[in-house]
Image (tube, rainbow, N blue to C red):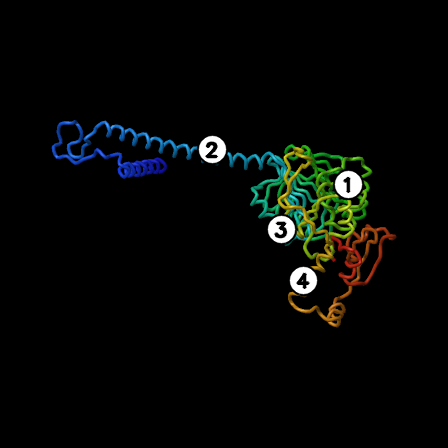
Amino acid sequence: MRKKKAGKSIILFMTGWLLAGLLQGGIFTGLTRQDTGHGTGCTDSLSFTDCSNFSAVSAAITASAAQTAQTAQTAQTAQIVQTAQIVQTADSLTEDSFGIHILDVGQGLCVLLEADGSYMLYDGGGREYSSYVVAYLKEHGVDSLSYLVASHYDEDHISGLVGVLNTTAVETALTPDYTADSDIYRSFRTMLESNGAAEVHPLAGETFQLGSAMIQILSPAGYTYEDENDNSIAMRIEYGAFSCILTGDAGGDAEADMIASGYTLDSDLYVVGHHGSSTSSTEAFVSAVSPDCAVISAGAGNSYGHPAEQTLSVLKQAGAELYRTDVQGEILCYADGTDTDGRNCRFNVDATDNWLSGAELSQTSDAASEASFGSPASDTDAAADTASEASEEYVLNTRSMKFHYPDCQSVALMSDANKKIVTADRETLIQEGYSPCGNCNP
C-alpha cells in the first residue's frame, strides 16, 4: 500500500509541476475570467475563450501524467530485476563453486574447503584461535560439516577442532590411527564422542566425495611412522580442472612414500607442509606437485623461523606464486572447475613478493622496533638474559629434528640411533634447527 501511495504522490506532483510550466510558458493564453458563466459550454467561473485549446492542453496533461507513471513503474521493475540478478549471482558463487579458506591461525593450520554447498574443515589451529575458527564458520553460514579432518594430533592443529566439535554438527571425522599423551588429545576425543560424528581412519588410496569434488588420500599407507608428523593425513582434492594438496606436517619420509606410490601429485595449489619447515617440501616432492601457487600458514614472528629459507628457495625455483598468512592474513582461493586462459583459480589477494624466511622477517621487525623505540639492549643485558634462561634435559630425535621431554611417549618409539639426550635451553635448540614435539610441548 505504501508503494502505491508513493506512486500517486509522484504523479500528482509531476502533474502540478507540468501545469505550472504550461501556465508560465503561455500555453493558457486564452484563459480569461468571465462572470456570465453561460453560452460556450465551458466552466461558468474559470473558462476558456478557446475550448479547443483547453482540450489539447488537457490531453497533454493526461499523456504526460501517464508517461510519468510508466517511467516510474519501469524504473521500479528494473530495480527489482537488478536485485534479483545480484541475488542469483551470489547464490551461484556460493553453491556452484569451490573455495579454500586458509585461516590466519598464527603458528598453526586451519583450512576450510567448500564444494557445491558442502564443507570440510582440515585442522583447526591452536587453542588461542579456537573462538576465531568457530566465529568464522558461523559468519560464513557453516552450520554443519560433511568432514572434519585432524591431520595429526599436535596442539597447533587440533585445539581449534575441539571448539568446532562443541558447536557444529559433523557427519564424518577423518582422524589418524594413533594416540597421543596430551590433555588436548583427550579433550579432542571427548568432544568427538559427544558430537556423534562417524570416525574413519583413512588410508592411502581411499577416496571421499565433497559435493562434486573428489578427495584422494595420499598418505599414510599405515600409521607406523616413527615421527608422528609423518602420520599426517595427506590428501589431494580435485574439482573439475582445479586441484590442490594438503599434507599437514608430513615430512620428507612421508613425501618420499607419496612420490613412490604412483598417485597423481601434480596440483594447481599446494598448502605447504609443516608451516614451511625445512623438514618438509623436499625438492623432489615440490617438483612432483609442480604447483602454480603455494600457500604457507605460519605465525608472524614465530620462534621456529618458519617458513624456512630452504623451503622458500625450493618453491621459488619451482616457479610457484607465493601466498603466506604471516604476511597477508587470511588467504581465500576460489575455482569454478574450469580452465580459463590457463588460470584455474583466483585469490582474494595478489601473490606476495616477500620471500624472506620467518627468521629474516623477525630480524627485520626487530630492527624496525629498535629504530622506533630506542637503541638495542647492551651485550651485558643480552648475556644476562641468556644466563637467566633455565636449561632443561631434553631428548632429541636427530632424524626428525624434534625435541621432547624425557617422559614423552614418543621417546619410547625412537630408535637408539636417532636418540640424543641433552641439557640445553629451548631457544638454543630451536636456533639449531629443532622444533618442539607437538604432544609434550616442551
**Marks 3 and 2, how far apart at CA:** 42 Å
Q: Position of residue 383 (x, y in %)?
A: 76, 70
Residue at 18% x, 29% y: name it.
42
Disc 2: CA contacts within 10 A as few (<14), some (14-19) or many (>=20): few
Amino acid tagged 3: Ser
Task: Reply above or below: 88 against 127.
Answer: above
- Residue 321 got which mark? none
Foreground mark, 1 or 4?
A: 4
Q: What element carries label 4?
A: helix
- Whether residue 225 sits left or right of residue 19 in the image: it is right
Q: In the figure, residue 146 lies in which quadrant? A: top right
For label 2, the residue is 81
- Residue 220 got which mark? 1
**Marks 2 and 1, how far apart at CA:** 52 Å
Q: Position of residue 438 (x, y in %)?
A: 73, 52
First along the sequence among labels 3 and 2: 2
Residue at 78% x, 45% y: name it.
317
Outermost residue, right direction?
417
For label 4, the residue is 368
Amino acid tagged 4: Ala
Q: Where is residue 371 in the image (x, y as percent from the top left)?
A: 67, 65
User: Does residue 155 show up?
Assistant: no
Q: Is mark 1 on a helix, strand or loop?
A: loop
Q: Position of residue 409 (x, y in %)?
A: 78, 52
Task: Reply above or below: 26 against 103.
Answer: above
For label 3, the residue is 130
**Marks 4 and 2, how far apart at CA:** 54 Å
